[in-house]
Image (tube, grey):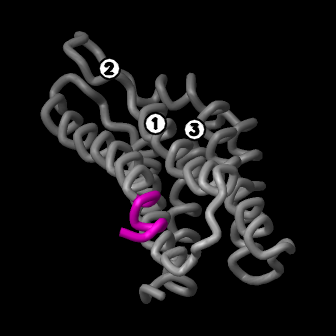
């Protein structure tokens, strides 16, 4: 087992927990459909978080030749899955045995934390890339991450439900384009 294989186990576990929470949350929403009013913005963000987690895991394969790991470099590598895992819990209300569950109120209540953490993901990614390469990247991938960060910071401040739904749909389309342009094939 090489260093990357060893270190990627923990990353995979954290991503797996986030994906598991999103998928089990989706199943619980179906089970509780008589008591839970579905919220399109929450569903859209669940899909986006699922795709981001998969993309993070997919892109991590590019690190397989990196043999120069330090503890700090590993922490940066680990921070993105940690943040995404936390967000996978923030996006969904507790779907326990309560009489009423309100995904819209949950989204509104957690909006600032959700988007604040989401804005941190591309920032951590840029810092990580700069740490590894010795310079800040100046390419289409870096531009997307800056746009994604700005979008999240703006969304953290705007409570309007229509804006939030339009934003979620826009981010979903933007992220699908990002993956199509930069990450369709495993490198």
Numbered label attached to residue 91: 1
Q: Answer above or below: position of 104 versus 118.
A: above
Rendered residue at 42%/62% (across/down): 51
Magenta region: 1-8
**Mark-to-mark CA distance, 1 and 3:** 15 Å
Name the residue tied to disc 3.
161
**Mark-to-mark CA distance, 2 and 3:** 18 Å
Q: Is residue 181 left or right of residue 129?
A: left
Q: Residues within 10 Å of mark 3 (few under 14, many from 20)?
A: few
The secondary structure type at the circle numbered 3 is: helix
Q: Is residue 178 left or right of residue 56?
A: right
**Mark-to-mark CA distance, 1 and 2:** 13 Å
Q: Answer above or below: position of 35 versus 14.
A: above
Pick the front one: 6 or 103:
6
Residue 88: horizontal and vertical position, in percent?
A: 43, 40
Q: Answer above or below: position of 103 versus 169.
A: above
Which residue in the rendered view is the most extreme toward the right?
A: 135
Numbered label attached to residue 160: none
């Amino acid at each position: 087992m090489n260093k990357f294989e060893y270190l990627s186990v923990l990353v995979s576990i954290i991503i797996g927990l986030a994906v598991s929470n999103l998928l089990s949350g989706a199943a619980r929403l179906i089970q509780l459909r008589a008591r839970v009013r579905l919220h399109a913005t929450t569903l859209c963000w669940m899909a986006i978080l699922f795709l981001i987690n998969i993309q993070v895991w997919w892109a991590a394969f590019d690190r397989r030749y990196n043999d120069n790991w330090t503890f700090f470099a590993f922490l940066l590598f680990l921070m993105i899955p940690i943040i995404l895992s936390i967000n996978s819990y923030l996006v969904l209300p507790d779907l326990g045995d309560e009489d009423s569950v309100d995904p819209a109120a949950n989204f509104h209540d957690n909006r600032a934390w959700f988007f604040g953490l989401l804005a941190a993901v591309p920032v951590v990614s840029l810092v990580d890339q700069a740490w590894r390469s010795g310079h800040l990247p100046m390419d289409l991938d870096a531009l997307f991450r800056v746009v994604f960060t700005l979008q999240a910071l703006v969304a953290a401040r705007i409570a309007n439900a229509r804006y939030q739904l339009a934003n979620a749909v826009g981010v979903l389309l933007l992220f699908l384009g990002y993956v199509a342009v930069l990450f369709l094939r495993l490198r």
